[in-house]
Structure formats: C-alpha cells, structure tokens
Amino acid sequence: MKIGLIGFGKAGKAVANVILESKDFSLEWVLKNKRASVFSTAKDALNKVADDNSLIYSTADIIIEELFASDRVDIIIDFSDAESISQYGPVAAKYGIKIISAISHYNVDQIAFLKELSAITTVFWSPNITLGVNYLLFAAALLKNIAPDVDIELVEEHFKSKSGVSGTAVRIAETLDIEAKSINSVRAGGIVGKHEVIFGFPYQTVRLVHESISREAFGSGALFVAQNIKDKKSGFYNFEDILRPYFFGNGNLLS
C-alpha cells in the first residue's frame, strides 16, 4: 500500500521511520511546507535502509495536483497543521485517495470541510492516533456506562512547549461528558504525552493510564488505521468505528 506523508516535523519523522520499517506499506513521498533540506529522501534524512522512494517535496517548489497525479498513492497521512487540509484535501478527494488526519485541533469550519471531503473519499480523523490512547478512551467510556455517577478527573501531561489543552484530553472529556475544568494539564521537560483518567468510587479508585514513550507510537497507530480503512468506502471515520468490532464482535463485548 502506497503512502504519501504530509508534514515532516518531529511527529512526521517518527511516522516516516515506522513506515520505512514496514513490509506492508511503502512511503512514496513526503510533502512539507519548508523548502527541501540537503536530503532528497526521507530514508536518507532518517539514515534508514529501505526500498521506499520516500522523496521529499516542498509545497514551495511543487504543484500539489501534479504530484498527486504523477506519483499516485493509496493513502495520505497528515501530520502537518490544520490549514493543510484545504490545500491538499480537494485534490486527494478528486483522485480517490484516502485521508488519515492526525491533526490535534480543527476548528468547526475545518471539521465541516473534512465531512464534505468524506462524501467523495474515505476520511479518518483522530486528535491522537496512538492505538493505546484510543483503547483507553473506549475502555473509559465502558466504565462510565457501568457507573454513570462516578467522580472523574483527567490529567494530561506533555512537553513544556506544548500550548493549549491536549486535543486528546478534550476528546476524552467530551466522550465521558465531563466539564473542561476536570482536565488538569501538566507541562514539563520533554514528556511525549501522558493521559490518565481517574475514576473515584466511594471505597476504591480506578485509574486508566496511557503514556507515549516515543513518537513512533503515532506511526504504528497510523498504520493500524491504514490497514483498517483500506477497504472502507467513502465516509467520515474515527477510532470508535475501527475499534468497535474488536470489542463487540457479533454484539457481545469481546466476543
């Protein structure tokens, strides 16, 4: 399966690293906003040995439609910024390329635009694309259904320079129907990302914790999604759509 990667920052490089190590996926190209560096391929930039083309392009030097037409891919994985979808989205939809977006924050109009694109092609969006944190989200929702009146607090920890509340924490809060004031944010050092949901019962406490040890977790999560949407028709999907069959099978939990 041929992959095109949008964005080549810290997360994008980690994702590229995982794709280059995969036997089931091929990194055809990387598209970034800044002009290409001294490296012409992602495998050279990351010092990896792979058969993937992994050519690095800059939006300043190439017309996106020409790239998509000449170097066709099956799926685009986006680790850039919220504005990029308006640049590549319509072209990807035109060519029937599936879109996996791992952008933390979209505004209302951008989400509406994603849904417009999903009428034409397959669009997946998750503010946090790691498999573990989405497993946590699903498990937390199940526990909340069992004990709807339990006290819930949410702690999210990230690297010192991360601004704003974690998009993943906001998503967890929305899923569990708790107020934003129950989100406690910690910014320190180089923490990649940690989320903890605390369920306070009268005589016991349950804690669900997920911690990203390396940004490569984003890559393995993105490829898990790619594997699970490769045969899906046009539509707007999230992790719940992908994980539900694994949890419930034929209708019963873990059947």
Image (cartoon, grey):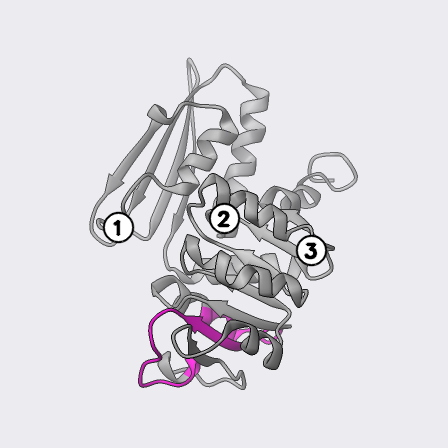
Q: Position of residue 85 (x, y in %)?
A: 50, 57
Instruction: Give the class, few, some or many, for how many residues have Cα within 10 Å of label 2's Cα (few <14, many ≥20).
Output: some
| Residue with the mark numbered 2 | 132
Q: Which of marks 3 and 1 is nearer the N terminus?
A: 3
The three-letter amino acid code for the residue at tag 3 is Ile
Give the labeled residue for mark 3: 120
Q: Is residue 221 above or below residue 69?
A: above
Q: How far apart are marks 1 and 2 (CA)?
A: 19 Å
Q: Do the residues labelled 2 and 3 touch (CB within 8 Å)?
A: no
Residue 157's place in the image compared with 70, above or below, is above
Q: Is residue 21 magenta?
A: yes
Q: Does the magenta stretch include residue 82?
A: no
> Left or right: where does residue 36 sit relative to residue 221?
left
Secondary element at tag 1: loop
| Mark 3 residue crowding within 10 angstroms, few (<14) / some (14–19) / many (20+) | some
Q: Residue at x 35, y 48 (%)?
A: 193
The quarter in which the C terminus is drawn is top right
State the extent of the magenta-drawn residues as a range: 16-43
Labels 1 & 2 near each other (Cβ < 8 A): no
Looking at the image, tell me whether mark 1 or mark 2 is earlier in sequence order: 2
Residue 173 percent coordinates (x, y): 44, 30
